[in-house]
Amino acid sequence: MSETVTRTPAPPLRTRQPSATQLGLSRAAIETRMFFREKDAVIFTFSFPIVLLVIFGSIFAGDLEGTGLTVSQLYVASLIGSATMTGFQNLGINIAGDRDDGTLKRLRGTPLPPSSYFMGKALNTLFISFLQVVILLAIGVTMFGLELPSEAGRWVTFAWVFVLGVLGSSLLGIAVSSLPRSAKSASAVISMPFVVLQFISGVFIPITELPSWLVNIASVFPLKWMCQGFRSVFLGDAGATLEIAKSYELDRVALVLGAWVIGGLVLCLMTFRWKSRRDG
């Protein structure tokens, strides 16, 4: 009598799901590829700060008395702060567009965690901002005689001001992306306050030449402190006399930028919407 052999089917193989961090990195790569495919956006994003630096640096090229620095070098340091905060404008406009055309709604229905989506946006912004800063520094060195720091401590300051600045402005951009009623109005709604901030935060006009009430308003927002931090890196001790407090106040720079990272995160959680207003 023959025996019947019963085979137990092997359990199905379990595929390991990627972590939220891995998905965020993948999303960042996708965002970066999508950005560089938009040729007009790439050209405008990188050419605009270059044009501003060349124009302002060439027109206002005099010496800053008693410092050994030039006005052009002051503009380089301040425009680096402005370039670092472009994530506020870019993310605010782009996410408003994603919401309006239904991209966010579709992503919400996928396994992609919200944290991975935001991580991808922030890392893409970090990369683009870094490229802008490198280009501005190259122009500052070659055209306006800016000397790069030789002390490691100043580069450490650059690193934390840059990272905190990008994170804070990115989170703020995500938060304000809910303000425009549609993608068509996003550029006007978000660009205007950014332009105003640049004028009152010492980007285009030296901070010591502004009325005190405007400086007080600018001090609430991160851009003024980002510019101040970058001036400490690239202008050194000689540039401290150009500040209102006659020092760079790096402790306050760190405090304000850190507060905006936390505050930006809270604002995101309070205001962010996956669907447009017409979708309810």
Image (cartoon, helix red, strand yellow):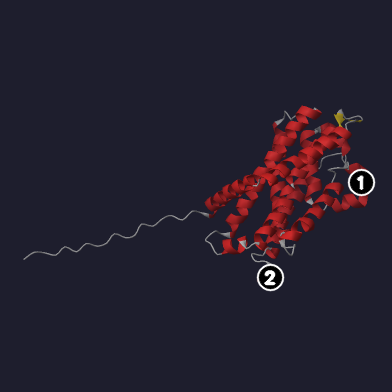
User: What residue is shown at x 67% (from left), y 47% (from top)?
Assistant: 125
- Looking at the rendering, in which quadrant would you find the N terminus? bottom left
Relative height, residue 145 to residue 116 (above, below): above
Quarter of the image for residue 64 reads top right
Q: Which quadrant holds residue 229? A: top right
Q: Is residue 271 left or right of residue 196?
A: left
Seen from this angle, which residue lies furthest bottom?
280
Residue 218 image point, x, y percent: 84, 51
Spot the residue most to the front.
40
Say the numbered circle drawn on residue 210: 1
Which of the labelled discs sits on residue 278, or is there none? Answer: 2
Taking the image as drawn, is residue 119 in sight? Answer: yes
Q: Position of residue 168 (x, y in %)?
A: 71, 51
Residue 247 appears at what percent x and percent y? 84, 39
Crowding at mark 1 (Cα within 10 Å: few <14, some 14-19, many 20+): some
Q: Amino acid at mark 1?
A: Leu
Q: Quadrant of the C terminus?
A: bottom right
SS at mark 1 in the image: loop
Q: Position of residue 123 (x, y in %)?
A: 63, 48
Residue at disc 2, secondary structure: helix
Q: Earlier in the sequence, mark 1 or mark 2?
A: 1
Residue 183 sits in which quadrant?
Answer: bottom right
Q: Residues within 10 Å of mark 2 (few under 14, many from 20)?
A: few
Decide if residue 18 is on the left or right side of residue 74: left
Label at residue 274? none
